[in-house]
Amino acid sequence: METIVRKSLLYKTKVEYGDYTVNHIQGCSHGCRYPCYAMMLSKRFGRSKDYTEWCQPKLVSNALELLDKEIPKYKKDIKSVQLCFMTDPFMYGYPETSELSLKIIKKFNDNDIKCTALTKGIFPADLIKTSKINEYGITLISLDENFREYYEPGSAPYQSRINSLKKLHDYGFKTWVSIEPYPTPNIIEQDINKILHVISFTDKIIFGRLNYSKDVSKYENYKIYYNKLADEVTDFCKANNINFHIKKGTIA
């Protein structure tokens, strides 16, 4: 993999359910076509000139050295660190990203700092050796592999994601699932309850609508549709004693 050098890595995020975060990879091979907010932001600030470049990830070669300087500086303020909000820490088909992510998680854990990680890849087996203070999650917006192959072309198959998350759950880790960005029926016809039942083992579910897409506004009464889905997710989680979070802007 190509590498880049950065001047800083650890920072406070403005994402509503986040605290601190690191993005130790630039770009993402999963190539999501929703569109992807991280890609749009990277293009806006000149980090990636186009979709092709975005799909060719680069490791931050000095990530561990930066954290050696930044963790002591921010440690007293950190509640948790998210891997990642602008890329994927366990990129499917790129073991180098997983290797660096594991080293980063260990470094935070050695400083008694909790990590949370979200992926469309597969969690590596070595994660079971990390601290139980950590929480691990997958993104899952469908069970249809034809949908995944078009909208998330470089990502891991859905069942493989679910299996790797279930393994961590069985080892005693807290797990979560992000059902976001959830598509409208004019993009794909599907039953969200089938997704919910497949992930009923998890400890938390986050649900959010699809943004930045003209296709959503083409679907009549899409606001009512998302309101209904938010209610279904809420009712399912309450009935199954699962924590949940409905993203801002999902409910009209």
Image (tube, grey):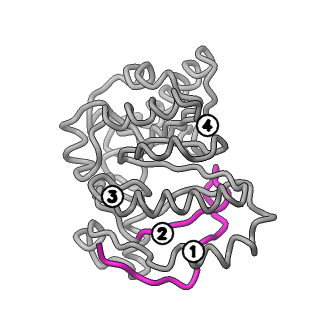
With respect to residue 200, does 23 lie above or below? below
Q: Which mark is residue 9?
A: 1
Magenta stretch secondary structure, dominant: loop
Q: Quadrant of residue 25?
A: bottom left
- 2 and 4 marks in contact (CB < 8 Å): no
- 2 and 1 marks in contact (CB < 8 Å): yes
Which residue reaches farthest right?
76
| Residue at the spot of label 3 | 95
Image location (x, y in percent) of residue 98:
41, 57
Residues rendered magenta in the picture = 1-25
* Three-letter code for the amino acid on which mark 3 is drawn: Pro
Q: Is residue 10 magenta?
A: yes
Foreground label between 2 and 4: 2
Question: Which of the pair 130/90 is nearer the observer?
Answer: 130
Q: Secondary structure at mark 2?
A: loop
Give the class, few, some or many, for how many residues have Cα within 10 Å of label 1's Cα (few <14, many ≥20): some
* Three-letter code for the amino acid on which mark 2 is drawn: His
| Residue at the spot of label 2 | 24
| Residue at the spot of label 4 | 245
* Three-letter code for the amino acid on which mark 4 is drawn: His
Closer to the chain start, of discs 1 and 4, is 1
Give the class, few, some or many, for how many residues have Cα within 10 Å of label 3's Cα (few <14, many ≥20): few
Q: Secondary structure at mark 4?
A: strand
Closer to the chain start, of discs 2 and 4, is 2
Residue sitting at 74 percent across and 60 percent down? 78
* Three-letter code for the amino acid on which mark 1 is drawn: Leu
Image location (x, y in percent) of residue 144:
25, 32
Closer to the chain start, of discs 1 and 3, is 1
Give the class, few, some or many, for how many residues have Cα within 10 Å of label 4's Cα (few <14, many ≥20): some
Foreground label between 1 and 3: 3
